[in-house]
Image (cartoon, rainbow, N blue to C red):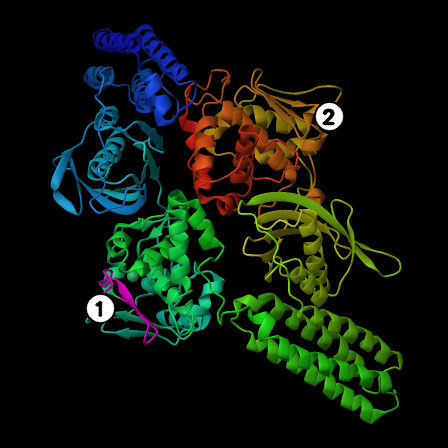
Amino acid sequence: MNEEQRAELMAIAALVDAFVAEPTQRALDTILTRLRRLIRDVQVRAGGIEKLDDGTLKAIGYDGIELTGLRMISAMLRRELRVLFAPPAVPPRAVPGRNEIAAVCAEQAGAMRLLAQRVPPVNFGNPRQGFPGVPFTTLARHACVIDLGTNKLYLSTEPHVRIDLYGFTASIVQLRTLGVTFLGLTGIADLPPQEQSWLCGAAIRLFVEFAYTVPQLCCNVEIAAGDRKLYLRLVLTEDRALFLTCESRIALRARPTGATLQVLKESLRRTYQLRAVSEQGAVWTVEELLEIQAAFAKIPLADRGALVDLELVRSGSSQIDRPDAAQHRGYYDTVNHSFTILNGAFADLNGFVGSGDDAVPYSHFVILHEIGHVVENWYRVPGGQDGGALALFGAQVEALQVQPFTIYAWHNWAAKPIEFFADAYSYFLNDPGAMEYVSHQLLTWFRQGGYRITRGGTRLAMTGLAGPLQTLLGALDGLCNALTAVRSTDQKAVDSLRVSASTLITQLRALFDTLTGYWDARIERAVLWWVAELFKSEATPRLSPPGGGLPAPTVFAELKAIFLRERETLATLLAVVVTPPVRTLRRVSSGACTILMLPDGVTVVRGRRGGDRVMRSLPRAVAALRELGFTGVTLHDSTGGISFWEYTWLYNAAATVFTDCDSQFALAVNVSVAVPSRDRPLLVRFTFFANRSLWIECENVAPALAVPPSVETSTQLLRDRYKVKAVTTAGGCAWTAGELVQVCDAFTKLPAADRRVLQNCTLVRGNGATLGKGTYEAATHTLTFSDATFTSLTEGFHGRSGAVAPPSHWNVLRLVGQAAAMHNWAWDDEPPLTVSLCLGPFTTAATHLGLGASITLLAPDAQPQWIEFFADAYALNLCEPYLLAWISPGLQSWFATGVYRQYVG
Ligand SMILES: [Zn+2]
């Protein structure tokens, strides 16, 4: 603030003092209006940007935390005093008495006077002794206790250092004095005042503890005050900006399923092919095994081979002197391939790891840290230490300049880099958001399996597979020769053919079995599997017709054609695939594709760009995916009714969709596939992962409404529930009942807090090329929808099982997202802002997370815009939050916790 603004703040404080003596509505209005004008003034000075780089900050003397302080003071006065003149109907609140008014005013006026004072700059930069000079981030966890008797707060690790708790705004002012330059608050503004002061107290204590020694910190804090538990995620950045997020913790622990100890042990043993689940001086409980189960479920499929034959031991306390500092929690014994879990692993019942809805008990961190050791041991190069997972990891963190980011890893660094790997592995699986904060490149590296070596040194499919494959091809040639020579009357020859065919199928399956557990040969395995399945379903019934007897003469030529075709498929496995480039930025897209049955029996898949493709057999389609660069394919059928033929179509469709999308890996595409056998399209999500595996997920469709509500009913609902001003039309267009249902359905996905964005807006049904899929105009607060806004499930879809919706929901919510970016969150009755206040912080956050200015596929020449990116991410968070989390856990939590709402005008 400049001198003029400071003087104005002192003048407002005097008005607050005077209000105590004479509390009139007029006086309160004056206070709030002048405060608001001051806030705008300070904001304008910062050019509408919230968080600036150091240079700009110094040049204009802008201090973000002053703004937060002013806003919170204003919010407190409104919240506590407005009730005197305009009591809200819901919830009913008692009108404050004279003493309460005096207390509120004294606190806020006091905070104003402190805020009006200049604070000398605080010097940081005493890096923790022995730490290298480059910036690094620390991930930590702390527990704070509030002593309700004395109203003091302390860290559970340092009970003797107790600090006093102040009011909310007084705490903000104190943080400013300590040197905090910017304060972001999420989920805190609406809490009861006492809890706000607890959260700020914890922030003050931890800031004092860490700010002088740690450049960047991401800390999960549990605050215990009597029976009340609060969870705080504290993020401190290098330029001393502090972000506090209060998180809800529901269903933190794994839910009991009714399974007994014995059932759980057996299920763990079978699922992960463990040697045993045993006990030594301690016993497993159902709760502990449930946590193990939940933690193990996060281990990537590719790494599960490391657990084969592992013994999982529950023991009381460590008898041996383990070098692992976490020895009171658990350890991995490489010689016996056993993982011992001790009492300490489960002792910390309240600590948590992760954030938002993904937070889990701290035991998950311990469990997956040890699994990190198991995995590292597995990805070692036989006969040496070079080139294994640890060496790959070491090279990566060196290249990225990432320092050990936990205190534990730091203490072990250089001497035992393995602890850094184990902690990083655990964070990668338990709290990807925190790891993304440390280094999004390192998270990407983990996600792409950068630590996985090819077991055996060279690509197995090219060496180990070649010999057995040649033998198989020879056997196939022999069978084809026999098919040419055979006559239907020859019972002996037919018998011999049956034996040859069945031997061939057995050989195919045996080769499939020998490749079990070889990650590198997943797609080759899939081809072998489907060739065997196809031969079985084609050869067996043809050679042994139902009702006995000999096959018809034409059968041999038909079979020979099939065998020759699949011989070609198997032969393609011998070819080396040129690895296509992989993009690191994830994207989402949507589309449609049709499978046509032509009169001559040829089936064609038509892509979005009209690229027809002749239908291939199932094994050939999988082999074609291999040629496109895929290393694995998985089909998840949540509908439970996908037939063999539909499998064939889906694998064919996958290749078309992939080439349609410019052969991009790191892409999730929702496609509705029209197939001849169904009256409704199959809704399929194809995910082309960056590690070049393909997932095909078939979605269930909820039944459509029989009769949509009328235009009048929907219009009334929009007026009542969302307080929209009008639902109108333009250019001779008219709303249909179905369109309004889609609008209403899309709006139900809005969080309650965001409904106010729609207040007083006008919804227009228009048309025209300039409208595209709809527009939002802030000046008139109008959302205009066009023909292109409303599309049906045949043109794509959004959502996942049970909550599948047409693309129109996305289009509608994108427009609401644009409106949300312009909304004035403090004063709902005000028109939208002229400059978005949250777009700057959004840009900063997205850039920090390593994202470009788009998450959807754009035409190559399209100019990406931040507002479009914001609207896309906003809609994606509401339509498919798991996809946004896949793209970036940090960005998903930015939206899920409603950070954009804290930038008020
Ligand atoms: Zn360890």
Amino acid bearing label 2: Ala
Q: Write down the region rendered in magenta.
A: 323-341
Q: Position of residue 139 (x, y in %)?
A: 31, 46
Q: Position of residue 858 (x, y in %)?
A: 63, 37
Quadrant in which the C terminus appears: top left
Secondary structure at badge 1 equals loop
Choose mark 1 or mark 2, whichever is in front.
2
Q: Is residue 41 left or right of residue 17?
A: right
Residue 327 colored in magenta in the image: yes
Residue 275 colored in magenta in the image: no
Taking 723 as reference, is 187 above or below it? below
Q: Quadrant of residue 342?
A: bottom left
The residue tagged 1 is: 316
Q: Position of residue 783 (x, y in %)?
A: 61, 23
Q: Position of residue 640 (x, y in %)?
A: 62, 61
Taking 632 as reference, is 701 above or below it? above
The residue tagged 2 is: 769
Q: Is residue 759 left or right of residue 629?
A: left
Does mark 2 have its CB less than 8 Å from ligand 1?
A: no
